[in-house]
Amino acid sequence: MVKKAEPELQRPLKPVKDFTDDELVALIENSFDCFQGSADSWESAVGMMFLGKYMGWKIVHLVHSQATVKKYEKILGINVKTDFDPITDASRRSNAWKAIEGFSNFWKAVKGETDIPDARSPVIGSAE
């Protein structure tokens, strides 16, 4: 019996932040076709991608652990630091970003090495 070849994950040729809607759908479909594992991991990876697209990679790293970001990047074939802007206008809706904005060492806040309350808060506030 001949085993059917597994589809190969296609890496984006340009940053995801610059994708058209059709290109985003193609990336999502390709990642699904190549994915094997728990459906909630794939679904969460897609959600992380949209969070990064709209709020920037710094918010992604505030909301998710580095291990989770790496796992989701592998599922999607992306790199959040090169595919998304560091922050966007929408970043200010993140309580975590509000807590650390202006802090001199972003990565210390990400790693929890600061005394900044809400530095890892996943809460998104109003668009005001």
Image (cartoon, grey):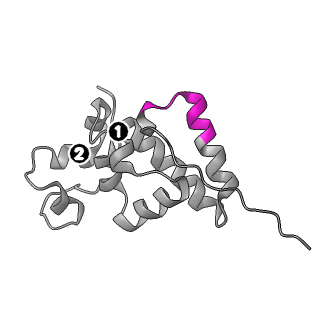
Q: Is residue 23 magenta?
A: yes
Up/down of 53 relative to 5, above or below: above
Within 10 angstroms of label 2, few (less than 14), some, or many (20 or more) residues? many
Examine the image and state in which quarter residue 101 appears. top left
- State which tag comes first along the sequence, 1 or 2: 1
Report whether 95 appears left or right of 76: left
User: Residue 118: x and y, percent?
Assistant: 23, 55
Determine whether label 1 and label 2 are within 8 Å by CB.
yes
Q: Which residue is mark 2?
A: 97
Q: Amino acid at mark 1?
A: Met
Report whether 41 appears left or right of 49: right
Q: Amino acid at mark 2?
A: Trp
Q: Is residue 50 magenta?
A: no
Within 10 angstroms of label 1, few (less than 14), some, or many (20 or more) residues? many
Q: Indicate the secondary structure of the residue bearing disc 2.
A: helix
* Residue at 48% across, 40% down: 13
User: Residue 10: x and y, percent?
Assistant: 58, 49
Report the residue that reaches farthest toward the bottom. Answer: 1
Examine the image and state in which quarter residue 40 appears. bottom right
Mark 1–mark 2 distance (CA, rounded to whole Å): 10 Å
User: Residue 99: x and y, percent?
Assistant: 18, 48
Q: Which residue is mark 1?
A: 55
Report the residue that reaches farthest toward the right. Answer: 1
For the stretch drawn in magenta, the main secondary structure is: helix
Residue 122 seen in this snapshot? no
* Residue at 19% across, 59% down: 107
The magenta segment is 18-26
